[in-house]
Image: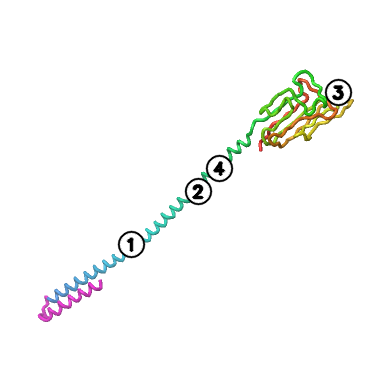
Amino acid sequence: MAHTTLFLFAVLGCLSLGLGSKRRGDSGVIEELSELKSLIKDMEAKVNETDAKNGDLKALEKRLNATEKELEKVKTDVQLLKKENEDIMAKLNDTVEELEKIKQNGSKTTEGPKVAFSVSLAASGETYLKDSDASPNVVYKRIFTNAGKAYDSKKGTFTAPVKGIYFFSFSTFGYNNFLSGAILTKNGEYMVSSYDAPSTGDVGDTGGNSVILQLEKGEQVSMKLWEKSQVFDNLNGHTTFSGFLLFPL
């Protein structure tokens, strides 16, 4: 703009000198010079206006550049958030799958095999069993339930099919002139028992007990009689032995 103004004034000066050398008093020339000065001022104003607009355009361009940079930053942040969200979803899916596996495995572990048995001494008639006839185990002949086939009715033994927690109970009946009772054993080791000495005050005696045992797969539980003892049973089921799996381990 400054160069343009100087150029215009230089032109004006030359015109003034040229005209002045010929007709310095000529009013027409002066009027033309005045019009030329006015024109120059108008042009200078327009140049100034253009410069102002150029300044506004530069400021606007600067703001647009800043906005563009901000948008690029927002775009980058959105991409990062999207990536983080994808990672979180992937981890969540992995966790859900893992929980489902644990649930399935836990369900299988909790359910385990179906194991339960309940038996009594006499399968028919009446049975008087002495300890000398029950060596090494009391063999219960009448089978009420034997789910899982873990009780052996030929040997009188229960064999754990899986490692787990098991519940056992038994009952006995004997007449007063004999010691009565029984012993529950685990692998031949005494666990719990019932015991009633001979007496003359009553006709018969009933006893029993129960226990919860942890068994490894293959371990055995069976019943024994006390030395010189005797138990009685008939189809009323006085002398019994029962057990079942509470839950596997």
Label 4: few (<14), some (14–19) or many (≥20) C-alpha neighbours in 10 Å: few
Which quadrant does the C terminus fall into? top right
- Location of residue 234 (image quadrant): top right
| Residue 193: x %, y % from top left | 80, 32
Give the mark nearest the N terminus, 1 or 4. Answer: 1
CA distance separating discs 1 and 3: 116 Å
* Viewer-side label of 3, 4: 4
Asked whether 168 falls inside the magenta stretch, the response is: no
Residue lying farthest top? 125
Name the residue that disc number 4 marks. Answer: 98
Name the residue that disc number 2 marks. Answer: 88
Q: Assign a secondary structure to mark 1.
A: helix
- Location of residue 48 (image quadrant): bottom left
- Magenta segment: 1-28
| Residue 23: x %, y % from top left | 10, 80
Give the mark nearest the N terminus, 3 or 4. Answer: 4
CA distance separating discs 2 and 3: 77 Å
Cβ–Cβ under 8 Å for marks 1 and 4:
no
